Image (cartoon, rainbow, N blue to C red):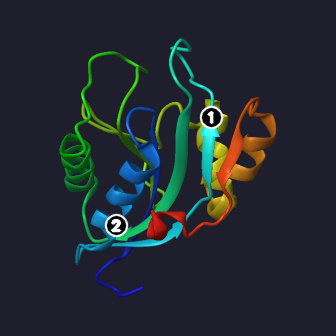
């Protein structure tokens, strides 16, 4: 990767309204098209049961690795702008959405601000995050353990591979 993109970031993406796979693909393509970002890895695409608020449609989830020159605050602003562009409405916590983009990790940074917490505060509880993240980043250490170890203890009930090709986002 070019030195201009020194930071390794992992993102969690999901959605269950409209065409969430298309929305995630569009978001990844938009990030990859920027001179300050490059998508360097993407997980398989997963179909997952809803979490938290369970009376809604299944979700599609994926994770991606991004190389970026953006600082965390600028990156979360960009992700929120992409969500808004994709018609994301924040009416209900854990409710239905067209697109959700979470910053999971940013290098080895620990950050706890009003706007952003890194590593993502609930990622280690969620099989729908850990399973796709382990597709390409099982070695990343979060809270003292590799992602692959956290995944062994996670509930992955009902999670299915929707597209096994990590290039799904380029074809969508």
Q: Nearer the viewer, residue 22 or 147?
A: 22
On the question of residue 143 being in view, the answer is no
Q: In this view, does 165 lie above or below 11?
A: below
Q: Quadrant of the C terminus?
A: bottom left
x then y, percent, for residue 167: 55, 70
The residue that appears at 26% across and 24% down in the rendered structure is 90
Q: Is mark 1 on a helix, strand or loop?
A: strand
Pick whichever, 139 or 27, lies toward us.
27
Quick check: can you spot residue 39? yes
Q: Is residue 153 left or right of residue 127?
A: right
Q: Is residue 3 left or right of residue 166?
A: left
Which is more toward the observer, 99 or 80?
99
Residue 48, numbered circle: 1
* Residue at the image point whose x is 62% and y is 58% from the top: 44
Measure the alpha-carbon separation of dots 1 and 2.
23 Å
Q: Residue 14: percent from the left, percent from the top?
A: 46, 41
The answer to which of marks 1 and 2 sits earlier in the sequence is 2
Tag count in the figure? 2
Q: Which residue extends farthest right? A: 152
Q: In this view, does 135 lie above or below 122?
A: below
The residue lying at 40 percent from left, 24 percent from top is 96
As drawn, the label of residue 73 is: none
Whether residue 57 is situated above or below residue 82 in the rendered picture: above
**Crowd rating for badge 1 (residues with CA inside 10 Å; few <14, some 14–19, many 20+):** many
Q: Is mark 2 on a helix, strand or loop?
A: helix
Residue on which disc 2 sits: 29
Residue 156 image position (x, y, % from top left): 74, 34
User: CB under 8 Å between callouts 1 and 2?
Assistant: no
Q: Which of 86 and 31 is in front in this view?
A: 86
Disc 2 crowd, CA 10 A, few/some/many (<14, 14-19, 20+)? some
Q: Position of residue 87 (x, y in %)?
A: 22, 37
Q: Quadrant of residue 61?
A: top right
């Amino acid at each position: 990767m070019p030195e201009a993109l020194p930071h390794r970031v992992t993102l969690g993406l999901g959605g269950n309204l409209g065409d969430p796979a298309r929305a995630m693909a569009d978001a990844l393509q938009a990030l990859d098209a920027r001179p300050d970002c490059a998508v360097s890895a993407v997980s398989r695409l997963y179909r997952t049961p809803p979490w938290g608020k369970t009376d809604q449609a299944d979700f599609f989830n994926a994770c991606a690795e991004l190389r970026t020159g953006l600082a965390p605050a600028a990156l979360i602003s960009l992700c929120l702008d992409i969500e808004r562009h994709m018609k994301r409405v924040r009416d209900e916590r854990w409710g239905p959405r067209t697109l959700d983009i979470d910053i999971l990790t940013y290098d080895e940074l620990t950050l706890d601000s009003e706007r952003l917490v890194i590593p993502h505060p609930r990622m280690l509880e969620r099989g729908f995050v850990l399973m796709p993240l382990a597709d390409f980043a099982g070695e990343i250490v979060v809270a003292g353990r590799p992602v692959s170890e956290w995944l062994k203890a996670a509930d992955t009930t009902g999670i299915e591979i929707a597209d096994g090709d990590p290039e799904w986002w380029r074809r969508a």
